[in-house]
Image (cartoon, rainbow, N blue to C red):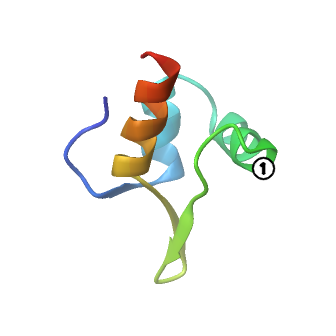
Amino acid sequence: MLSNKKFVSVTTLAAWYDVTKATIWRWSKEGVLPSPIKIMGSTRWSVAKLNEWESKLGK
């Protein structure tokens, strides 16, 4: 599971899943990942939603 941060960037997410940032954007567009949100003009993913998504996958 991801750290206790509330939101993470595409760079952090790519490092966590050991994929490129382009893969994160593709997964997001395809609906594989939970939808990101905009915070002050930056796109971020909710760690709580990602952890919930991972638990459903059995990770």
Residue sitting at 63 percent across and 32 percent down?
20
- For the N terminus, the image quarter is top left
Number of marks drawn: 1
Q: Is residue 52 above or below residue 16?
A: below
Horizontal and vertical percent for residue 16?
42, 29
- Residue type of the residue flagged with mark 1: Lys
- Quick one: quadrant of the C terminus? top left
Outermost front residue: 56
- Crowd tier of the residue under label 1, counting other residues whose Cα lies within 10 Å: few below 14, some 14–19, many 20 or above: few
Which of the two residues, 25 or 48, is positioned nearer the viewer here? Answer: 48
Q: Residue furthest left?
A: 4
Q: Indicate the position of residue 28 as horizontal and vertical percent values.
A: 69, 47
Taking 11 as reference, is 7 left or right? Answer: left
Which residue is most to the bottom? 40
Q: Nearer the viewer, residue 55 or 44?
A: 55
Q: Residue at x 48, y 36 (%)?
A: 53
Vertical arrangement, residue 11 with respect to residue 7, above or below: above
Q: Position of residue 51 (x, y in %)?
A: 37, 37
The spot of residue 25 in percent (x, y) is: 70, 47
Q: Residue at x 53, y 49 (%)?
A: 10
Answer with left or right where residue 30 lies relative to residue 39: right
The residue where tag 1 is placed is: 29
> As displayed, is residue 19 above or below residue 58?
below
Viewer-nearest residue: 27 or 19: 27
Residue 23 left/right relative to 52: right
At horizontal 61% and vertical 56% (from top left) the residue drawn is 35
Q: Secondary structure at mark 1?
A: helix
